Image (cartoon, rainbow, N blue to C red):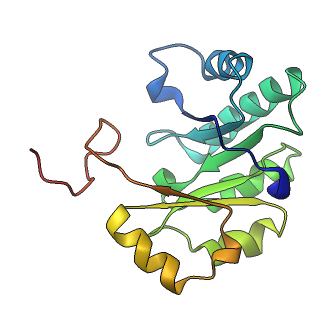
């Protein structure tokens, strides 16, 4: 998956941002609309629940016949850096392509070491921090970068920007 990664239409979804709809329904609709990457992200659920949502997502992607073309990633930042949730899901035979972490979370070196060379590892950081990271880090370990946020949102209240 790493060499064929397409993040041109990237869905970030978890139970707290579906307006009460099942996560699996939102993912199915997104796949029909052409999304190419799905990230399961939850600020509130346990590792066990995160794995359950990941299973649902993998099932929906497989049912759509897109397991080879749509990447399934898990954002572990909000569950105390529990990269083991991704590893545990993989051990259960769930097709999880990789992980998305923040610059201050589990180092990408550890993600790559645990998940292997074919896993997708995405990294995000604030714009002012990313430039320094790119200058000093081994970028061969990272598949894509996310920079932001640009403004405060309900899920990013700590964006560091002054209210204007």
- Position of 97 with respect to 157 (left or right) is right
How many numbered marks appear? 0
- Position of 14 with respect to 54 (left or right) is left
Please give the name of the residue rendered at 42% of the width and 74% of the height, measured from the top-left corner: 131
- Position of 37 with respect to 47 (left or right) is right
- Position of 128 with respect to 97 (left or right) is left
Instruction: Determine the image quadrant of residue 98.
Output: bottom right
Percent coordinates x, y for residue 110 in the rendering = 66, 75
Compared to 95, does 62 lie above or below?
above
Percent coordinates x, y for residue 124 in the rendering = 49, 59
Q: Nearer the viewer, residue 37 or 110?
A: 37
Compared to 154, does 110 lie above or below?
below
Please give the name of the residue rendered at 84% of the width and 38% of the height, measured from the top-left corner: 69
Compared to 1, does 54 lie above or below?
above
Please give the name of the residue rendered at 66% of the width and 33% of the height, measured from the top-left corner: 53
The quadrant of the picture occupied by the C terminus is: top left
Compared to 142, does 10 lie above or below?
above
Percent coordinates x, y for residue 130 in the rendering = 43, 69
- In the rendered image, the residue lying farthest to the bottom is 136
Q: Nearer the viewer, residue 152 or 63?
A: 152
Instruction: Determine the image quadrant of residue 113.
Output: bottom right
- In the rendered image, the residue lying farthest to the left is 164
Percent coordinates x, y for residue 155 in the rendering = 35, 40
Please give the name of the residue rendered at 84% of the width and 63% of the height, measured from the top-left corner: 118
């Amino acid at each position: 998956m790493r060499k064929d990664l397409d993040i041109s239409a990237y869905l970030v979804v978890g139970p707290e941002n579906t307006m009460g709809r099942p996560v699996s329904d939102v993912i199915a609709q997104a796949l029909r609309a052409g999304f190419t990457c799905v990230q399961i992200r939850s600020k509130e659920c346990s590792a066990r629940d995160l794995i359950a949502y990941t299973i649902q997502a993998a099932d929906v992607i497989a049912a759509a016949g897109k397991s080879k073309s749509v990447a399934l990633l898990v954002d572990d930042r909000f569950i105390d850096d529990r990269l083991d949730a991704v590893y545990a899901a993989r051990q259960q035979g769930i097709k999880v392509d990789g992980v998305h972490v923040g610059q201050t979370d589990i180092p990408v070196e550890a993600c790559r070491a645990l998940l292997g060379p074919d896993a997708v590892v995405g990294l995000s950081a604030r714009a002012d921090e990313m430039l320094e990271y790119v200058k000093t880090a081994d970028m061969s370990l990272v598949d894509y970068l996310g920079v932001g946020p640009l403004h405060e949102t309900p899920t990013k209240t700590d964006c560091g920007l002054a209210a204007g």
